[in-house]
Image (tube, rainbow, N blue to C red):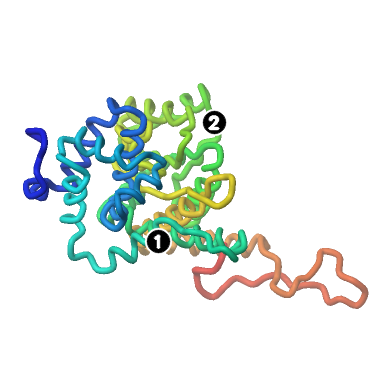
Amino acid sequence: MARNNIDREQSTAMSMDELTAAIHERIGAMPAQLAAGARFILDHPDVVVSSSMRDIAMSIGVAPATLVRLARALDFQDWSSLREIYVAAYRGTPGLYARGASALVEAGSGESLLARMADTLAAHTTRLGFINDAATFDAAVRRLAEAPRIYVAAFLSCRAPGLTFTYISRLFRDGVHLSEASGSSLVTELATLDEKDVVLSINFSPYSRDSLLVAGAVKRSGAGLISLADSRVTPLTDVAEHVLLFETASPSFFPTIAAATALVEALTAGMMRHLGVKATEHLTRVEQSLYAADTYVAANARSSSPGPGAVPASKSSPPPTTGNNS
C-alpha cells in the first residue's frame, strides 16, 4: 500500500490477496490486540463481510475501537474501508450471509450439551469449504499424492487426526510415516527428508514446540510442507507451501479436533481420486489381505464367550467389491 488513508472508493481497487500479504508483513510488529484482530480477519474473511464490527470485536475479545486502529495500522481510513476489500472480493457469491451465519453457534436456552456439541461440530465441518478455497485444497492434494514419502507431524492432541490420515492413506499407497518422536529424536527422524518429500503438519494454538523443529527440518531439506492449522499465522506459515484451516472452538473445556479429522479425511479422499486405478488396486490388495487374516469379527458374532447352545460365529468373508470399512 503506497500511501496512508486510502479512501473507500480507492480501497476496492486492492485485491484481498494484496491485503492478506500486507497483514502477514506487518502482523509481527503489531501490539497483541491488533495482532489478534489481524489473525481473525485472515482466518475468517467471510465473517468480515457478514458481521458487524461490534460483533467481530466481541468474537475476538477486543473493543470495537481496536478494529478501527487495526484498519489505520494497515493504512485504511476506517474499518469500513478495510471491510470493503472483502465485500468486493465476495460480492456476487451465492449464499454468503447464510454461510457466515454458521461461524458462531449460539446455544439455545433449552439445548443439551450434546445438542450444542453436535451443532458446533457440524458448523465447523460445514465451514471447511468456505474458509479453504478449492484451488488451495486441490494443490495440497496433488502435492501429497505425488510425493514419494509423506511424514505426518501431529503432536499432542493433534495426534488423533494424524493417525487417521496415516491409517487411511496406507490403505491405498506406500510411503506414509507418522512421526513417533519429539525433541532431538524428531530432528534425527526428519534428517532423511529431501525435496521430493512432503511433511503434513497438524497443529493448533498453543502450538507445540516441536513445530519449530519441523519448520527447521523443512527449511534445511527443501521438502514441501502442507500445514493444517487453526490460523494462517503459525510457526509453520513461512515455510508452508499450502495452509488449510480448521476451527477448534467448542462448548467443551477442550478444543475440538472434529474439523481437523474431517479435513484429513477429505485429503485422503482427494489423494485416492488423484492416484486413480493404481490406488484402487493397492486398496484391493490390502483389503483382501485384511479379510484373509481374519481381521474382522463376523456381523453375527455377539460374544467371545458364547452361552450354552450358541452357534459359533463363522469367519467373515471378503467383500465382493472395495470400499467397505477397513
Q: Residue at x 46, y 37 (%)?
A: 205
Q: Position of residue 110 (x, y in %)?
A: 60, 66
Q: Residue furthest right?
A: 308
Q: Amino acid at mark 1?
A: Ser
Q: Amino acid at mark 2?
A: Ala
Q: Considering depth in this image, is 211 or 146 the residue closer to the camera?
A: 211
The residue mark sitting in front, 2 or 1, is 1
Q: Residue at x 30, y 53 (%)?
A: 52
| Quarter of the image that includes the N terminus | top left
Residue 11 visible (yes or no): yes
Q: Residues within 10 Å of mark 2 (few under 14, many from 20)?
A: some
Q: Residue at x 22, y 44 (%)?
A: 79
- Mark 2 or mark 1, earlier in chain: 1
Q: Considering depth in this image, is 108 or 143 the residue closer to the camera?
A: 108
User: For mark 2, what is the residue?
Assistant: 181
User: For mark 1, what is the residue?
Assistant: 102
Residue 196 visible (yes or no): no
Q: Considering depth in this image, is 254 or 66 the residue closer to the camera?
A: 66
In this rendering, position of residue 247 left or right of residue 158: left
